[in-house]
Amino acid sequence: MQLGHALAVGVLAVALAAGAEAKSVKIGIVATFSGNGAEFGQQIERGYELYRKLHSNEIAPHTVEIIKRDSKRPDGAEAKNAVQELITRDKVDVLAGFVFSPDAMSSAPLVTQAKVPMIIMNAGTAWIPKLSPYIARVSFSMWQSGYVMGEYAAATMKHKTAIIGITDYPPGKDSAEAFKRGFEAKGGQVVDTIPMGGPAEVPDFTPFFQRVKDAKPNAFYVFVPAGNHAAAVAKTYANLGMRAAGIDLIGPGDITPDNNLQEMGEAAVGMTVVHHYSADYDTPENKAFVKAWKEAYGANSTPDFMGVQGYDGMAAIFSAIKKLDGNMDGDKVMEVLKSWKFASPRGPIAINPETRDIIQNEYVHKIVKDGARLKVSVVGKVDQVKDQCVELKVGRCGQ
Ligand code: PHB
């Protein structure tokens, strides 16, 4: 009898260890799933769903439940409502997504109060991770691409003068400051900075670009929030004959996203940008990723930087589920994220434990023609870039 009892207890313990403790980890995703930013939400969703599909066996017996919320406009209001509800009503373990910077900014105080980790899968304003100890960013800081582009434009492309054109909201201001610092550190001079409308609607870029054409700088550095803004930039540049006028169009890779590159046509050929991802990277990790993406979403679908950020973000969440055996205490999740490293399709990435921001390679992309197709040719690389805004203690990054 004694032995029987001991056996029964033993069997129960094994059963608990083997599966009775299976957790369903709730992830609240806040991203633009409608309107002008719908393609961003789709890229991010395809990315995280692909990672989930390929790796769900690794978190067994645990599973994830995803609750999606549409942040709609890029003004932060809808995202904040969604975060509030996801925290209080749905009781999510983790929040992720956040396409537009204002959406991450408005939500930051809520995650601090609730101690719910927030994994930024896009929003690029440099100082966002400073807004809460519960934020970790797997995407980028605008300074990573902007500063490297500035240095490269002066030191390698030998440009002496540049004009900056930006979408007029926080990541645009960051990108402008980053480019200017990098460009002027290597002897270039920024002669004008032009705000070109807000992120919600694609403006008519013609009057802004005409002003640049008339001023004849060597280079025109442009930041707009990817998608159809980017397609309009390339078209306006072509329509005004600015390449023939000797003005080089450069920027962060947001202006040549893989997802929109083919529709840009001839206008994009010859552009030079700096970024952390292209679907054209010739590495085993990226080839496997693009192949799996096309198998899942069709030959005509191409991952771009937002797609890879969604994929990597889910990899980060999975690493926490594995390490913590599904017990997603907010402080413990943040500790795991701070030492997270990953062989991403974009190259090796890590979260900087001091800033909770990403460290990654930045690549110099030249847009070339490959038959009828446009393609990214990698002509330069800077390894393991940290955020220069924080390193140089600029503005809110220094506080
Ligand atoms: C942002 O709002 O932070 C943002 C949006 C789109 C981009 C880059 C940054 O392409």
Image (cartoon, grey):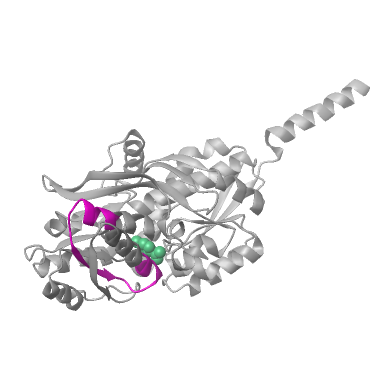
State yes or no: residue 15 in magenta. Answer: no
Depicted 66 relative to depicted 50: above or below: below
Residue 374 location (% of width, % of height): 17, 50
Residue 356 location (% of width, % of height): 53, 53
- Front position in the image: 388 or 306: 388
- Front position in the image: 16 or 58: 58
Tell me if I can see residue 37 in this picture.
yes
Residue 250 location (% of width, % of height): 22, 59
- Front position in the image: 201 or 49: 201
- Front position in the image: 101 or 387: 387
Magenta residue span: 149-174
Count of marks, rendered view: 0
Q: Residue furthest right?
A: 1
Q: Is residue 90 left or right of residue 56?
A: right
Tell me if I can see residue 257 in this picture.
no
Q: Quadrant of the N terminus?
A: top right
Depicted 250 relative to depicted 310: above or below: below
Residue 35 location (% of width, % of height): 36, 69
Quadrant observed for ligand 1 in the rendered image: bottom left
Q: Is residue 268 left or right of residue 131?
A: left
Q: Residue at x 52, y 40 (%)?
A: 56
Q: Residue furthest left?
A: 244
Q: Residue furthest bottom?
A: 207
Q: Residue at x 29, y 44 (%)?
A: 381
